[in-house]
Amino acid sequence: MKLQDFLKPELLGNKFIAVKGYSEILDRETQKITAYRLNVSIQSENSDFYMEMIPVKINNLTPTVSVQELKENKVRPIQLENLNVGQFNGALWFNATDVLPVKQQ
């Protein structure tokens, strides 16, 4: 089995919890915010993987679940829109285009 076999976002399941809010990703030259990083806990019982926390780069400066909302609520169920998984130099990376709310039951 090779690392490429694990690069399918559907293997992570679809039940996630955002933890502790966003952190800013700054452009090295301009020091302007280019994206956010969010720590996400995988909670899907049917997931083939268990990782306590994965950092996900959010390529959106105005995510649906806002920066302010996650400052006030440190833990929140979310959905990740267009989740992608890749690898560079043997390390996994995760990114998504938006963070969507999940209605709590």
Image (cartoon, rainbow, N blue to C red):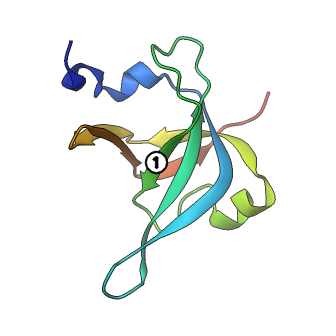
Q: Position of residue 2 (x, y in %)?
A: 19, 19
What's under tag 1, amino acid-wise?
Val
Judged left or right of residue 20, residue 105 is right
Quadrant of res 101: top right
Circle count: 1
Which residue corresponds to the image point at 63% horizontal and 62% vertical from the top-left? 66
Q: Residue at x 25, y 39 (%)?
A: 87
Residue at x 59%, y 60% (from the top left corner): 22
Q: Nearer the viewer, residue 2 or 65?
A: 2
Q: Is residue 16 above or below residue 30?
A: above
- Up the image or down, 68 lies above or below 8; here it is below
Q: Nearer the viewer, residue 63 or 27?
A: 27
Q: In the image, what residue occupies the spot 80% across and 60% down?
A: 72
Find residue 105 and report its horizontal and vertical position in percent: 80, 27
Is residue 10 shown above or below 65? above
Q: List the residue tagged with mark 1.
A: 56
Measured as percent of width and height from the top left, residue 17 is found at 64, 37
| Image position of 9 (left or right of 77) | left
